[in-house]
Amino acid sequence: MIKKISLFWILLGLSISSGAASTDGAIQFMQKLGDQVIQTTQTKHGEEKRQALRDIFENSVHHTSIAQFVLGKARRALKFVFKEVDDLEKEKQALAHDVKNSLEEFYKIYKESVTRTYLSSFDRDYKDEVFQATHAKQDGEDGVVVYSTLDRKNGAPPLNLHWVLKSTEGGLKILDLRVEGVSQAEKERDEAASIIRKHKDQCKQDGGKFCDLAALKKLTDDHKTLNDEWKKKIRGEAISVN
């Protein structure tokens, strides 16, 4: 079963003007954004809150880059499926089309998965939490890491959150979040690798072909199932409230 994506994707929402990464700008924007997210959880409810947070979230993260990183070696292994077809251009073109479509479908569904888990984390407000972006450092030519804390005010120690950002044509986008030094993207990649390996092994045991591709499709289906179940739950809650 797919492990729940970390609740701490709660502040994924950074988009700064394009160009070289600015540490001062990143800190200021991150602080403003953190305050905005926490305020949203306090002042909005139900579908209004989910939509407001979705708007913040979906425009802030470089989803494709994260999805490609999460797939890791499994994405690169897809090139080996071409060795399983006859040396016929027509068959190779059909397989290449299937690989391309399968990757695009995973990127789309994975984005929904992260959004689902992100929104699921806001069933309560965060009136007792205080977010503080403290400092930042350059990370290569076009990146920056923003260091922040989340003071939970409930007796638990503050959380140290490090946001890994990269400058793109659309501005700075979040690529990873390190919670107490642990990379959330790396955790997702390790889990995806385990699931893909299980599906791939089963495919081989069944005597299947193109097992790397089949495993990717199974991973996508796993995410889609959880997404659909969550959507049904949300619809049911909306009906009961009305």
Image: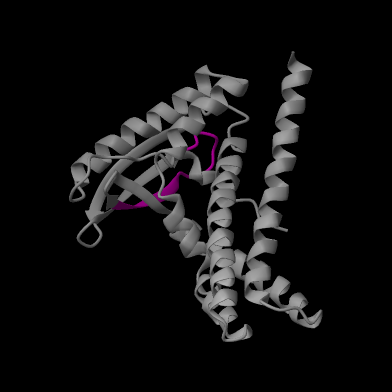
Q: Quadrant of the N terminus?
A: bottom right
Which colouring convention does the figure follow? one colour
Residue 127 in view here:
no
Q: Residue at x 65, y 57 (%)?
A: 220
Q: Residue at x 50, y 30 (%)?
A: 53
Residue 184 position, x and y percent, is 50, 57
Q: Residue at x 75, y 76 (%)?
A: 203
Q: Is residue 27 magenta?
A: no
Q: Residue at x 32, y 30 (%)?
A: 32
Residue 198 position, x and y percent, is 72, 73
Between 4 and 69, the one lying in front of the other is 69
Residue with the most extreme top position: 242
Between 237 and 124, the one lying in front of the other is 237
Residue 50 position, x and y percent, is 56, 28
Between 35 and 46, the one lying in front of the other is 46
Q: Quadrant of the C terminus?
A: top right
Q: Please, is residue 205 above or below residue 138 in the view?
A: below
* In the image: residue 156, left or right of residue 177: right
Q: Please, is residue 143 above or below residue 208 in the view?
A: above
Which stretch did the figure color magenta?
151-166
* In the image: residue 12, left or right of residue 226: left
* In the image: residue 103, left or right of residue 134: right
Residue 149 position, x and y percent, is 39, 43
Which of the 4 quarters of the picture holds residue 119? top right
Residue 238 in view here:
yes
